[in-house]
Every structure is written in C-alpha cells, then in structure tokens.
Amino acid sequence: MPTHNSHLAAVRCAQDRTPRISSNDWRCCCGALLGIHRDGLMHVSFARGHEYLFSYPATATCRRCGTMSQTKGPAR
Ligand SMILES: [Zn+2]
C-alpha cells in the first residue's frame, strides 16, 4: 500500500525539521543559549573555543540582551 507508506514518511520528515531544544539547555529569558547542564556542572562555551565548567549556582550575563541569569541546576 504505497499511500500508507508515503504518509508515514511525511510524518517522520516533519519531526526531523522541528528544532531540537534540549532540556539540558540553560537559556536566558530572551531565549539565548547561556550554557548546557552537563554531569552536574554548567558547561559554557565562549567564542574562539574557550570552554568553562561551573559548579552550581552559576551566574552569567546574556551576551544578547545583557540580563544576568542564575541557575541552580537542571530544571526538572
Ligand atoms: Zn538574554
């Protein structure tokens, strides 16, 4: 049944196109990515390949809107 199969393929394709927002993301209220929760630490990547791991609570200033945000751990 070719019509049934093509329907399934279309659904799978639509799912692949949705943006992947990980629950490990630490985001500013403006949506900018501040860091990633990783193994109990906050992983922050800066330009030019500098990467830092912070323990909680971690505080950072958004590079887009300048708002200071603090995280005490991954949201559950
Ligand atoms: Zn922001």
Image (cartoon, rainbow, N blue to C red):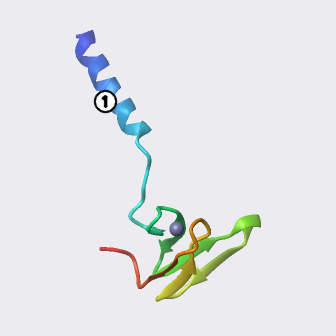
Q: Which residue is drawn at 34% across and 32% down?
A: 12
Judged from this view, the residue extending furthest toward the top is 2
Q: In this view, does 59 lie above or below 18?
A: below
Rendering quarter of residue 13: top left
Q: Is residue 53 left or right of residue 10?
A: right
Q: Position of residue 35 (x, y in %)?
A: 54, 71
Identify the image quadrant of the C terminus.
bottom left
Q: Residue at x 51, y 85 (%)?
A: 58
Q: Position of residue 46 (x, y in %)?
A: 68, 70
- Identify the amino acid type marked 1: Val
Identify the image quadrant of the N terminus.
top left
Query: Which residue lies under the disc numbered 1?
Result: 11
Q: Position of residue 71 (x, y in %)?
A: 44, 81
Q: In this view, does 4 lie above or below 68?
A: above
- Secondary structure of the residue carrying numbered label 1: helix
Q: Is residue 75 above or below residue 57?
A: above
Q: Residue at x 43, y 50 (%)?
A: 20
Depth check, front residue: 64 or 14: 64
Q: How many labels does the image show?
A: 1
Rendering quarter of residue 74: bottom left
Label 1 environment density (alpha carbons within 10 Å; few <14, some 14–19, many ≥20): few
Judged from this view, the residue extending furthest toward the right is 48
Q: Position of residue 5 (x, y in %)?
A: 28, 18
For disc 1, does the CB lie below 8 Å from ligand 1? no
Rendering quarter of residue 40: bottom left
Q: Is residue 12 left or right of residue 4?
A: right
